[in-house]
Image (tube, rainbow, N blue to C red):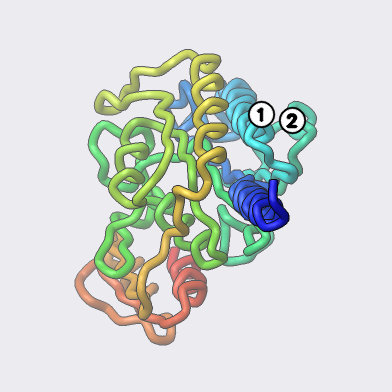
Amino acid sequence: MTHKKLVSTILLLFVFLTLSLAQTPRKVFISVDMEGISGVVHWEDVRTTGRDYNLFRTIMTEETNAAIIGAVAAGAKEIWVRDSHGTARNILPDKLDKRARLIRDWSGAPEGMMDGIDHTFDAVIFIGYHAKAGTPDATLDHTNSSSKIQDASVNGISLPEAGFNALIAGYSDVPVVFVAGDLAICEQVKGLFDTIETVSVKEGMGNAALCWHPSVSYDSIKEGVEKALKNLSAYKPYKMKPPYTLDVKFLSEVLANDAAQFPGAKRTGPWSVQYKHDDLMEMIRVFRWMY
Ligand SMILES: [Zn+2]
């Protein structure tokens, strides 16, 4: 090998190593909701007073563990888990895979279910997610508040919680790569994001659901997360162009009246309010105050 050839081979090797390192996820953020967990079909299943709540928080923890195992297999070195349902105190800390760190309770920050995310993360994973309010054949479909919101959209696009949370991740330039939940949310995110890996753990049948055994879901989640993270360069952060126009349709006239009182908010109909801002997180902050 000539000197010139040796130099170009070393250079090529260096470029290859840099590229492959850039594509290996070092830090992964997992946001975990509960309505889209295996077997969950009723509000009682996800409330602390429900007879089967303890069973489903165990399954919620195990689905999260499956995602952690998949992430580690794909090369992740640091994993944060954000308990994102109700009290944010559902995942069992002593049963969670010890390679991950757990964020419990709400800090009060507007990021909510994404609280803790920043630009140091390489990828985001959603576990236990559910479809937006008003989705037929979906399990416990709602948008942010089941008692207050009928629909919420940004720049004319009606979004599930996964959409709002992907925008928050996109604000820090982090892509969402994997979503697990019912079939309805899997279909909704495929319509929103250019590239997304999904695992459906159940299929809505009106108010009922056809469920996979939890252990089948664990295997599918582990494989899906590993596959997505090993192909990280295929995923792009979810972004929209500013200004950000938020349209919220409430479930009552009283709620719309109250929300319209926020500085800068505009009443657009009997149940509707609009708010516009150039900064995404300011819009998210106001949205959070509205419900
Ligand atoms: Zn929830």
Which element carries disc 2, helix, strand or loop? Answer: loop
> Disc 1 residue type?
Ile
**Left or right side of 11 for 39:** left
Q: Where is residue 16 in the image (x, y as percent from the top left)?
A: 62, 49
Q: How crowded is mark 1: few (under 14 residues within 10 Å), some or many (20 or more)?
A: many
Residue drawn at 33 percent across, 55 percent down: 159
Residues at discs 2 and 1 in contact (Cβ within 8 Å): yes
User: What kind of element bears circle 1?
Assistant: helix
176 sits to left or right of 146: right
- Residue in the image at 36% along x and 32% along y: 139
- Note whether 260 is above or below 284 in the view shown: below
Residue positioned 35% across, 42% down in the render: 131
Residue sitting nearer the eye, 48 or 287? 287
Q: Can residue 104 be seen in this view?
A: no
Q: Tell me: residue 127, above or below residue 242.
A: above
Q: How far apart are marks 2 and 1 (CA)?
A: 8 Å
Q: Looking at the image, which residue sits at the far left?
A: 269
Residue carrying label 2 = 97
In front of the other: 140 or 28: 28
Q: Which residue lies furthest to the bottom in this view?
A: 264
Q: Position of residue 277 (x, y in %)?
A: 41, 81
- Residue that badge 1 annotates: 69
Q: Is mark 1 within 8 Å of ligand 1?
A: no
Q: Write down the quadrant of residue 157 in the picture.
A: bottom left
Q: Position of residue 235 (x, y in %)?
A: 45, 50
Q: Which mark is residue 248?
A: none
Mark before the other along the chain sequence, 2 or 1: 1
Residue visible at 37% across and 56% down in the picture: 148
Amino acid type shown at disc 2: Asp
Disc 2 or disc 1, which is closer to the eye? 1
